[in-house]
Each structure stands twice: as C-alpha cells, then as structure tokens.
Image (spheres, helix red, strand yellow):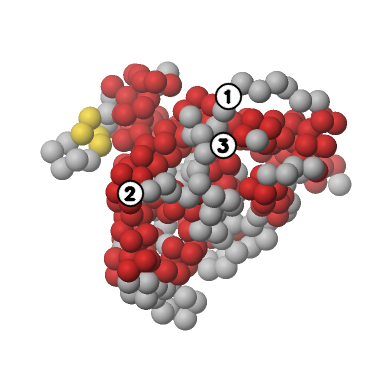
Amino acid sequence: MQAEAASSLGASLGAERVVAALKSAAAATGSDFHYLLGTAMRESSLKPTAQSSTSSAAGLFQFIDQTWLGLVKEHGGQHGLGNYAAAISKDSNGRYQADAGAKASILALRKNPETAALMAGEYAKSTQGTMRASLGREVCGGELYAAHFLGPDAACRLIKAAGSEPTISAASLFPQAAASNKSVFFHEGGAPKSVREVYDWAMKQPGGAGTVRIQDAGTPPLTFDKARLTVATAQDAQVQMLLASVMNWQPKHSAFSSLFGNQDKATPSSAMSFSPGLLGLLSDSKDATS
C-alpha cells in the first residue's frame, strides 16, 4: 500500500511539473496551452522520458533527432540555449549536424519537460503559420497535430487528399511514416488505411475540431477550493473535454507499444491523480482562455 501511494504521489508530482512546464511554454511562445497538453498526452502520456521503440523519437512530444536539432538551432537562442544552437550546423543536404558530444547533450534535452515544452510551443506556432499559408484558412487542433506527427508539408498533403481523394492509401503517400507507425496506417489485418481514416485519427486530438487559440499570459493564482470549483463548473466545452481526457486518456500511439507491453492495441493506464497543484494549474489555464 505504501509503495502504491508513493508511486501515485510521484506520478501526480511528475504530471504537475509537466503541466506547469506546458503552461509556462504557452505563455512564453504564444502557443495554445490546450493544444500542447493534448499533444503531450497523446504522444507520451505526459511521460518526459518516453522513448520510441520504432524511431529516434523521444520525450514529451516525441521529436525525432532532425526535427529537434532544427528547433534548437532556430529557437534555442531565445530560450537560453544559445551555446547549443551555435553548435548545430546544416549540411548541403539540409540535414542538421553537431559533433558527437554536443549532439548527445542537445538530444537529451528532449527529456527535459521545460525545454521540450518550449520547443513544442515554438514548433506549433511556426507550423500553424505554414499550414495557414498553404491551406488558405485557419487550422484546427487535430490538423495541427497531424503536422506534429507528419511535418507541416505532409500534413497539408494529407488534409488536401482527405478532401479530394479520401479513399486512397495513406501509406502510399507517406511510406516512411507508415513504416514506423503501422497501427496508424494499417488495419489489424494488414489492409492499408485511407487518407480519410488517418485524417480522422489525427482529429481525435483532445479539442481537435476547435481552432487553435493563443494563450494569454499572466493570470492570478487560485486557491485549491476555487480550482476545484472552476473545474467542476467549467462552461468551456473544449476545456471540459480536455479535463476529461486528462483523467481518462489511454495511450494508443504505436511508438509507445513497448512501454506498455502491447504491440498493436491500447493498454489502459491508471487515471491521473489530480493533486491540488495540478487542479490549480488546469483551472488557471481555463480561466486564462475563457
């Protein structure tokens, strides 16, 4: 019993740190807290040290090596990572490089929740602009998640194909992504999923149908009682769904199958414990965007 209680407390405190990091990153980068939280839930079940078994992806947001090196190169200087940014160069093929020692240290930052959240915020903000320009309209949370998963250019191809050729095989359009994420691109029997099916999968992002919002900064601290009341009486449907997702979400991303001992199907995870601090953080973020 004591061991279980200690484990539960540790998980709660870990989640509290992650949510605080996401909230801080949203304020620092102008990105949407709800989107960041939903993506971290979906990518790693809020586990900062998560490591993919099928690719180089790691950390809260499962950034692969090249994406992470590019983010640190472009945005690291804004967030106290100037030395790391300076150690990264781009070769003639457009690939990011760093010497072995520096590269290992830079990639390890993916498992630091504060740094990962900042880079995810910057990535979401820049990706949203890229997609808006390509599609000629605003993008919703699920479409932005597709860009996190596939990259912005590929996500725009997916979105356009889902509208014009919804029945074609998604794996034929994105063979590299399909090879690393078979459960996303193929049915259990091995039949390929259509681009519409993969698009619908991306839209399962908590709050996925809603337009991604800019997070406001600077809200007053809440008491625990007020936090509980705010969560219980939240009128914002997106926040209500998000809070329910935080409590009940179970990982389904194939990249995490090895973490949960299941290669194809979702494995239930215990519901997150809502400590006073975590309730306050979530409620505070609800108030900031109401």
Residue at 54%, 53% in the rendered image:
208
Residue at 33%, 54% in the rendered image:
156
Say which residue label 1 marks.
Answer: 217
Say which residue label 2 marks.
Answer: 136
Residue at 39%, 20% in the rendered image:
78
Q: Position of residue 283 (x, y in %)?
A: 72, 35
Eye-nearest disc, 3 or 2: 2
Nearest the viewer among 262 and 148 is: 148
101 lies left or right of 115: left
Secondary structure beneath dot 1 equals: loop
Q: Amino acid at mark 1?
A: Ala
Residue 232 occupies quadrant:
top right
Nearest the viewer among 236 and 144 is: 236
Height in image: 183 above or below 149? below
Q: Position of residue 196 (x, y in %)?
A: 42, 69
Give the mark, 1 or 2, whose residue is nearer the N terminus.
2
Give the mark, 3 or 2, whose residue is nearer the N terminus.
3
Q: CA distance from mark 3 to mark 1?
A: 10 Å
201 lies left or right of 127: right
Q: Amino acid at mark 3?
A: Phe
Q: Is residue 23 visible?
A: yes
Q: Amino acid at mark 2?
A: Gly
Secondary structure beneath dot 2 equals: loop
Say which residue label 3 marks.
Answer: 33
Local crowd size for mark 1, using a 10 Å CA cut-off: few (<14), some (14–19), many (≥20)? some
